[in-house]
Image (spheres, rainbow, N blue to C red):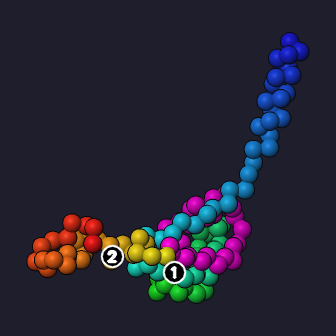
């Protein structure tokens, strides 16, 4: 009986500290990746009403649409007001530029009428 009580006490004590502040890490917007776009957005977020006030957006609205899509994740278990600056930095090089690397974007040098095999 004492062992059962001790196990129950340990389980209750172990589960009591599981209340975490879930910090949301913003992912990179797909629309911005298609344009190889980098920049930042400054927003005021009221988590109680799920209202977003955009102060500045360097992407002509792409980043603010991304914030509005992710408002539930950002405000998860939060009811306060947030003043946040998100910075989006694309990867360097052609791998991030989805428009420039679409197949077959570049014809082979030998025959310009033939479609690319994807290696050029």
Compared to 88, does 8 lie above or below? Answer: above
| Residue 87 sits inside the magenta stretch | yes
What residue is drawn where x is 60% and y is 77%? 87
Q: Looking at the image, do the residues carrying marks 2 and 1 touch, with CB atoms under 8 Å apart?
A: no
Q: How many labels does the image show?
A: 2
Q: Where is residue 50 in the image (x, y as percent from the top left)?
A: 59, 69
- Residue at the extreme top: 1
What residue is drawn where x is 86% and y is 12%? 1
Crowd class of label 1 (few under 14; some 14 to 19; many from 20; radius 10 Å): some
Q: Name the residue under label 1.
A: 38
Residue 14 lies left or right of residue 56; in this view the side is: right
Q: Name the residue under label 2.
A: 99
Res. 67 visible in picture: yes
Compared to 50, does 3 lie above or below? Answer: above
Compared to 23, does 14 lie above or below? Answer: above
Res. 68 visible in picture: no
Residue 71 lies left or right of residue 82; in this view the side is: left
Residue 54, quarter of the rendered image: bottom right
Depth check: 90 or 94 in front?
Answer: 94
Labelled disc at residue 63:
none
Depth check: 78 or 26 in front?
Answer: 26
- Label 1 sits on a secondary structure element that is loop
- Label 2 sits on a secondary structure element that is loop
Residue 33 lies left or right of residue 9; in this view the side is: left
Q: Where is residue 10 in the image (x, y as percent from the top left)?
A: 83, 29
Crowd class of label 2 (few under 14; some 14 to 19; many from 20; radius 10 Å): some
What residue is drawn where x is 65% and y is 72%? 46
Q: What stretch is highlighted in magenta?
A: 67-91
| Residue 105 sits inside the magenta stretch | no
Sequence order check, earlier mark of 2 and 1: 1
């Amino acid at each position: 009986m004492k062992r059962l009580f001790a196990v129950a006490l340990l389980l209750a004590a172990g589960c009591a500290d599981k209340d975490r502040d879930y910090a949301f890490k913003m992912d990179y917007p797909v629309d911005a990746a298609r344009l190889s776009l980098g920049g930042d957005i400054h927003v005021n977020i009221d988590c109680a009403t799920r209202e977003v006030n955009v102060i500045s957006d360097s992407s002509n609205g792409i980043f603010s649409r991304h914030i509005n899509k992710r408002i539930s994740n950002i405000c998860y278990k939060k009811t306060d007001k947030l003043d946040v600056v998100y910075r989006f930095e694309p990867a360097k090089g052609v791998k991030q530029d989805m428009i420039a690397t679409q197949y077959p974007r570049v014809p082979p040098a030998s025959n310009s009428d033939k479609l690319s095999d994807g290696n050029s």
